[in-house]
Amino acid sequence: METQEILKRYISENLLNSRFEVGAEDDLLGNDWVDSMGIMRLIAFIEEKFEITVPLEDVTIENFRTVQTIDTYLNK
């Protein structure tokens, strides 16, 4: 499964309680779908799933606004 699909599934099922499916370009923060606690849960998931560490200075709107920007960040 590709990274974007993994992220969309996690966000939809765990952060949005399966209310709807997230698209790759949906604004997670601007639409108030994911709050600061949700971002922290998402980062914990990313670190565990992809076996990386996300430094605090990388937790920015630019890196975590959409599934697509998260995917771009992870591929750096």
Image (cartoon, rainbow, N blue to C red):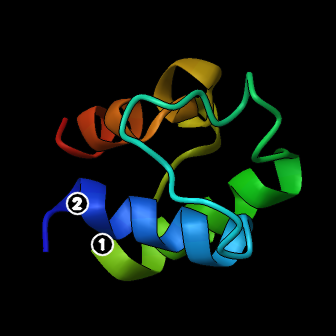
Tag shown at residue 29: none
Residue depicted at x 71% and y 52%? 39
Q: Look at discs 2 and 1 and give the one toward the viewer.
A: 2
In the figure, 54 relative to 68: above or below? below
Q: Position of residue 57 (x, y in %)?
A: 61, 31
Q: Residues within 10 Å of mark 2 (few under 14, many from 20)?
A: some
Secondary structure beneath label 1: helix
The residue under label 1 is which amino acid type?
A: Phe
In the rendered view, tell whether residue 13 sits above or below residue 63: below
Q: Residue furthest front?
A: 20
**Residue 24 shown left or right of residue 10 in the figure:** left
Label 2 – label 1 distance at C-alpha = 9 Å
Task: Verify CB contact (< 8 Å) between mark 2 and mark 1.
Answer: yes
Rendered residue at 50%/50% (across/down): 22
62 lies left or right of 18 = left
Q: Kindly identify the amino acid type of the residue bearing the numbered disc 2.
A: Thr
Q: Is residue 51 visible to the viewer in this orientation of the structure?
A: no
Front-lying residue, 20 or 31: 20
List x then y, in percent, for residue 28: 64, 36
Residue drawn at x 54%, y 46% as measured from the top left: 55
Q: Position of residue 26 (x, y in %)?
A: 51, 31
Viewer-closest of 28 and 73 = 28
The label number, if any, that marks residue 50 in the structure image: 1
Q: Residue at x 75, y 28 (%)?
A: 31
Residue to which mark 2 is pinned? 3
